[in-house]
Amino acid sequence: AAASRTSRDANREVFRRELKEPGCEWNGMFERLVRHREENGGNVYVPTEGNFAAGTKMRELAVWCREQRDDAAGMERTMPHRHAALEGIGFEFDLDDKWLTNYENLRRRKEERGHTRVARDESAESKTLALWVTRQRSLLRKHDEGRPSTLTPGKLRRLRDLGLRGAKKVAAWDINYNALVAFRKEHGHARVPQKYVGPDGSKSLAFWVMRMRKDYKVHKDRLNEGGERTAAREVMEERVRKLDDLGFVWRVFRKGASREDDEKHVGIIGDDADNKHRLGVNAGGIGTVDSGESVVMQEEDEDNASAEEALVDH
């Protein structure tokens, strides 16, 4: 046991000498990271290499930091002195390069636009970022609720610093509802065209309106089937009442098409006799869409639903 302790002590002394050894490439990069930390008020974080031009010293440092993260497990096992030195200055090993790239994109977006809302339909890049934001908000919600989450302390702190909050489905509904209230105030009705683009450049409200019609159809089918009264049913009934008060149109048919064809096309078939909700604003009880656009019920994929959550203001 004494011999083992002597060996460990000797190794520690070698490690200490190596960190101070001039001319060592690793030590040189470590010293550059220490200077970077001093120049940035104690913040050791270096943005990903994509933020810097090729051949620059900052890009070299960014690449080196990525390599330290990639080799964290091996470093801790074979060169614990280096691992300890990096931890000692606040270096974070739990930030992978892909995560950091998305984080940097969102950080720049907030600097440019003042918010963290991302519309999936702006570009292919925005769709990727919107899905990433949705994932982070879901993880934040799990963390806030005390459920298992894969967010590490470093990731959690950075998301909080950006002002990102856990996804709240009820809050998201309220935000879209308020957007519909604003639409009605501006246009005098609550009939949102399928291709409507909001002030933020997204189609979030149009997607949400279609989702509400689909949810109402499911809700009504379940009412017809009977069954026990549930909390989810009560929530939906309250939402229906709020939308009714706005004059929400639950069935919208295309101009010039027969009622039978449109009922098949739209997929929202109600019984006029027992449907107390508004089905339209004209004498025939059938809502139409401005500019002749059709509101077609369609299955929203998870991307649409995810982007809708991602559009919630933080």
Image (tube, grey):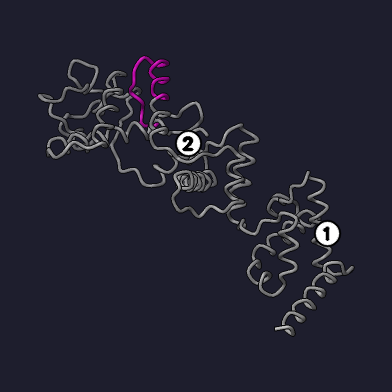
Residue stretch rendered in magenta on the structure: 178-195
Residue 49 image offset from top left, x and y in percent: 70, 55
Is any part of residue 216 visible from this angle?
yes
Q: Residues within 10 Å of mark 1 (few under 14, many from 20)?
A: some
Q: Residues within 10 Å of mark 2 (few under 14, many from 20)?
A: many
Mark 2: amino acid: Leu
Q: Nearer the viewer, residue 153 or 180?
A: 153
Name the mark on residue 297: none
Above or below 312: residue 13: below
Among the 4 quarters of the image, the one containing residue 237: top left
Please indicate whether residue 59 sits to the left or right of residue 198 in the image: right
Dot 1 falls on a residue whose secondary structure is helix
Furthest-right residue in this view: 22
Above or below 170: residue 130: below
The residue sitting at 61% across, 31% down in the picture is 114
In this figure, which residue is indicated by the disc labeled 2?
A: 311
Residue 159 image offset from top left, x and y in percent: 58, 44
The CA span between labels 2 and 1 is 42 Å
Dot 2 falls on a residue whose secondary structure is loop
Above or below 181: residue 40: below
Is any part of residue 252 visible from this angle?
no
Indicate yes or no whether the magenta region holds residue 300: no
Residue 220 image offset from top left, x and y in percent: 18, 34
Q: Nearer the viewer, mark 2 or mark 1?
A: 1
Please indicate whether residue 290 sits to the left or right of residue 203 in the image: left
Among the 4 quarters of the image, the one containing residue 65: bottom right
In this figure, which residue is indicated by the disc labeled 1?
A: 31
The residue sitting at 32% across, 34% down in the picture is 210
Do tag 2 and tag 1 residues touch (Cβ < 8 Å)?
A: no
The residue sitting at 66% across, 62% down in the picture is 69
Indicate yes or no whether the magenta region holds residue 187: yes
